[in-house]
Image (tube, grey):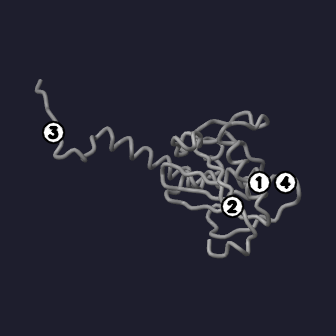
Amino acid sequence: MSIEYIVKKNKNELSQRKKEGLLKLAKLIQVFRLDPVFAVEWLFGIQLLDFQAYVFLKSWVTPNCVWCQCRGSGKTTLGSPFIMLKNLLIPNYQAYILASSGSQSKNMFSKIEQIAKREIESFTGLNDVFFNETVKNVANKDGFTHNPNSYEFKLYNGSCTNTLNSVPDNMRGK
């Protein structure tokens, strides 16, 4: 029996085990990107209703979409995991939450924050996958900043979401 030593050529070279782990992660991310309803259920623990899953799937690959739904249909509750999942699965994804008033933008942002922190009692199966991906520092201990100009969170993959807390006409440049 001979012992074989593996010597790395430089300090940036990955080991075979690390390469295999990264390949498995890449395949898992691709599965989640292909089936976002499964991803929401598996990553966040949110069970979507049939019509919500249909809206989710039809909106996933569309560059621009409008959800025209009745009052009480859960637009904010559905839009929050939609933005969360796009941020999580697409590196350097930039999302802006824009509504007819700043308070509505802040409301949707707070819904994302509540889902991430597992503060919604009726969502019994929530987990903290998204919360663990938010960039935390000394200034914002939970990863969510509440600057009056724009609420914001950032993820480790470079994705970011901001609210536009003003009249939409004043934010044309964004």
Q: Mark 2 or mark 1, which has the lower sequence index?
A: 1
**Residue found at x 12% / y 24%:** 1
Q: Whole-Å distance between the Cαs marked 1 and 4? A: 9 Å
Which mark is in front, 1 or 3?
1
- Dot 2, how many residues are within 10 Å of its Cα: few (below 14), some (14-19), or many (20+)? many
Left or right: where 158 falls relative to 3: right
Q: Judge by depth and name the residue closer to the eye, 134 or 5.
A: 134
Query: Are the residues at dot 1 and dot 4 in contact (C-beta closer than 8 Å)?
Result: no
Q: Judge by depth and name the residue closer to the eye, 80 or 138.
A: 138
**Residue found at x 65% / y 58%:** 150
Query: Are the residues at dot 2 and dot 1 in contact (C-beta closer than 8 Å)?
Result: no
Q: Mark 1 points at which residue?
A: 76
Secondary structure, mark 1, is helix
Q: Mark 3 or mark 4, which has the lower sequence index?
A: 3
Q: Whole-Å distance between the Cαs marked 1 and 3? A: 53 Å
- Dot 4, how many residues are within 10 Å of its Cα: few (below 14), some (14-19), or many (20+)? few
**Residue found at x 27% / y 40%:** 15
Q: Mark 2 points at which residue?
A: 97
Q: Mark 4 points at which residue?
A: 73
